[in-house]
Structures are given as C-alpha cells and as structure tokens.
Image: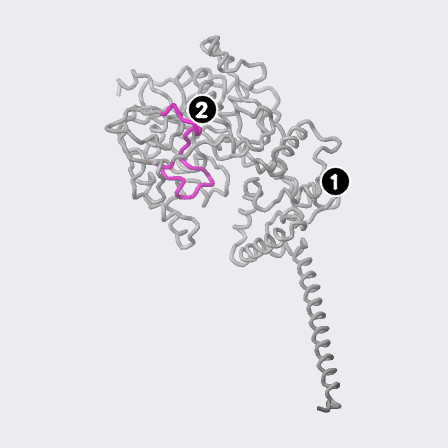
Amino acid sequence: MKKSKYSGGKNSTKKNRRGLFLFTGVFLGFALFVTLYQTTIYFSSNQSCMMCHVHPHADEAWRMGNHGGANNRTGVQVSCIDCHLPPRSQTWAHYTTKARMGLRHVWGKLTRDAEHWEQHWDRSLTWEEASRFVFSASCMQCHTNLFPQGISDAGIIAHLHFEENHQRLNLQCIACHLDAGHYNPNFLSGQMVGIPGMVTAAVDSADFFTEPAIVTAFANFTEQIPGTPISFNMIAIPGGQFTMGSPANEPFRNTNEGPQHEVQVSSFFMAEVQTTWDMFWEFYRQTMSEGRTPPDVARRNNEMATSVDGISGPTPPWGAPDQGWGMADRPAITMTHYAAQVFTQWLSFKTGRNYRLPTEAEWEFAARGGTETAYFFPGNPRDFTSGRFWRRARMEGITPYVFFDYNSNRRTHPSSELLPNPFGLRGMLGNVFEYTADRYNPNAFQGRTGVTIDPIVTEGTEGWVIRGGYFGSDAAGVRSAFRTHTRSDDWLRTDPQQPRSIWWYSDFRGIGFRVVLEPDPELLNLR
C-alpha cells in the first residue's frame, strides 16, 4: 500500500504536541516546586511565626536571650525554627512537625483569646512543657563541642552526664538551658549557692520564737518553731472509722484502689497546708550538710537525743527548685522522701514533739473529711474533665478546692488560696503530691478483712506511696482514693552528680509533703 504524503506531518505534529506538553509539565512542575520552596522559606521566617504566635513577651525575651538579637554574647543569632523544629537534616521529622505544629497554632490563633496566650507563655517557661517543642537534635546541630573553653566545673559535670546518657535516658538540653532561647531572669542553672531570696546581712532575731506553742487540749493550734520566725497551723483530726479505697463504679477508678475495706484511725494533728518554702528553707539554713553528721551516724551515737546539730540537712539542689514560680507560702517541692523525713526529725527536735509523715490511711481519712464520694465536695469526676469544652461551665464546682491541670497554669500555688475540706485542711487534692509513710504495694488492700486498725505498709519495692495528685493532674488524678508511687530513677534522670542526690529530685516538680503530729495521750483523755 502506498504511504500517504501527509502521514509524516501528522506524526511530527503529535511529537511536537508531546514535546510541548512535556515542556509545559516540566515548567509548571518546576514553578510549583519553586513556589512551594519559597512558601516554605517564608513560613519558616520569624515574621511568619509571629503572625500566629502572639505571646506578648516572646519576641522581647528572644532578643534578650543568649541566641537572639545582634548583641548576644555568642554573636550567633538563631531563628524560631532553629530551636522549635527538628533540624532540616531530619527531613521527614522536620516537615511533619512543622505541619502539625503550624496547623495547631493557626487553630489557636483563630479560637483563643489574649488571656489564653498569656497563660500559655507562662506554662512554656517550664522544661516539661518546653521539651514538647524544643528539640535537642537541633541544639546539637550547632553545639558540636560540649566542652568549650571557659566552661564551668558544673557545666563539665552536666555535659559529661549528658554525653554518656542522653540516648539511654532521653535527656534533653532544655532541662538545664531553659533560658537559652528566651531570657528568663528566674531560671537558675547549675548547683544553687545559698538560699534564694535570703538576705546575707545579719538577721534580726527579735521576732524569733523562743519556745514551741503550748498545747493544753486536743484542738487546733498554731505551732511555733523555736529559734525562727516561722509558725504554722495544725488541725486536730478526731480518730474514727472510714471506708478506705474507691467503689468499683467510681469513674476513672484504678485497680490499686480496691477492694474497699474498713479502717480505724487514731486521732492525730495534721498541718493545715503543705510544708512551705519558708519552713523548708529555715530547715535548710539550720542543717545544711556542710560539717554535719549524717542522720544514721548521729542516731547510732545518740547525738540526736541532745542536739539538733546532730541532724544533717540537704546539700544544695541542682538549679532553682521552685522553677521561678515563687517561694514563701507556696508548697516546698522537689525534695525526696528522705529529705521530707529528715525535715520531720528536725521539726521534732526543735519543738520537742513527735512530728512525722502521715500514713496512707491517715492521709485518706483526712482528705475525705468524713465523706465517701470521689471528692470531699459535690461532683462527679466526669463533670470536671477539662478536655470537654461543653463541661467547662461545671468547673466552678471544683476550682475553689483544687489546683489541677485546668486552673493551675502548670505550676504550684499557695494552698491557703483554696477553700478547706470539712476538717479544715487546704490543698489536700491537687497542687502537689504528698508523701506518706507507706511503701507502695499495688495490692496493699488485698486480704484486709474486718476493721484494720492504723495500718501501715513497711515493705515494697516500687517506692513510696504519694497521694492527692498535683498541678498537672486531671480530674481523675485528684480523687480522694487515687494512689500512686514515687519514681526515683525517672525523677533523677538529669541529675549529673555522682552519686545522685538523696535530697532533691531534678525532674519532677509536683511533689511535696505535710506533717502530722501524734498527740499526747493525756490530751485525748481530756476531751
């Protein structure tokens, strides 16, 4: 068959069209790539970040920080994404994190008010919160030498610990360098020297108490610590029988809260609020460890029977234990169970009384205040689930009594600001966990039959029982029956000292304690 003279032209036209389509596709693809790349660059700029991040102080604090502004001490200026995203070398993590965080903050910009962002900024000034959006891999992208010239001895100790353990323990730079990106005048890195806020000038002792309070009846009284200006309220808790634990139908109940059983508790005094910083720093000032005898040695030598000087108090904590939130009448936090016990020894010697930590049964009896419900105030735990916006109107039923994740702003507050429970105790739920004298056993309530009298668990391998929940707990974790335990290894991850401190936790700020007092038997006979 004879080939058409036009067939070659048709093929040529098809080829030209394919070439044009190919060229157009490549051009459009390249244009799209460039546009997306330039868009990514723009939305990675500080100006773009500040469109949604309306923290009132973020930009100002960054310019005053070690990595911001033109006059910082290093001469190296970083941008928002250099710290708040994984490094670009981790391509997938970098862009997925950027997308996730970007969408969340755009939504926040559209739905949140200025008050929310002010509170969000305050919450961000804790390493627990900051560690969610500051990445150690980004820090190490620039800081390749962890031992630069001029580093302090404390820095060498801390960086050696980080270098050897950061992968195994998941250590993060932000734990010790919280003020690196944004200036924070309240943050203290390294081992603390002296007592925060204490004036070095001579102390006027004219207002110091010379003797403890005189107690002539089993009734509320105000204790006075001799040789100090410190006093605190003690509440008389009449003994009685109560049902310990939670019923099977209580919302958010855990298995370690049962089975319910009857317990008889003897009468005791309990502090109205947790041990405050004013109280704890006085103990620290009078007993800090330099030149003191350790408690076990002093006890063997019978030194404690004659002098408070036999008690060896805490070594300095690593960093500021209050995180810059404030001290005074806020609950003292981050001390270990051992430190709390030694405090009660010191208080006993100063006052001539028998102060100690409460047993778990005493604590729950006191927290309930004669009630048998989830809280000592009306309300179902499901009503106070802060994640449900349609339930927030009901929060007024819990917020006058408890500092928890809804109203704490992720920090401690003076328990005196809360309304008391039926016994007159404040802050029993939330604010800070409270130590008890019991070892933790998840099955401690198993096998208790009849009425158990003044129980205490002295054996267990999972730490000490802590009760009450803390400022980061939800409504489920501040129920009267909620119980958990210390996690010393996890709470000492960033402590670089060898051996690690027996006095202070480096990684948990939600732990404190309140004291109880065993009454003189004669006072009980006078009732």
Report the residue marked by disc 1. Answer: 74
- Split into 4 quadrants, where in the image is the N terminus? bottom right
Could you tell me which secondary element the residue under label 2 belongs to? strand
Our reading of the magenta stretch's main secondary structure is loop
Tell which circle, 1 or 2, labels the residue nearer the N-terminal end.
Answer: 1
Report the residue marked by disc 2. Answer: 231
- Range of the magenta residues? 457-482
Left or right: 34, with 370 as reference point: right
Q: Position of residue 329 (x, y in %)?
A: 48, 31
Vertical position of residue 509 compared to residue 33: above or below = above
Is residue 157 visible from the viewing direction of this image?
yes
Vertical position of residue 87 compared to residue 457: above or below = below
Residue that appears at 35% across and 33% down: 367
Q: Position of residue 165 (x, y in %)?
A: 61, 33
Q: Amino acid at mark 2?
A: Ser
478 within the magenta span: yes
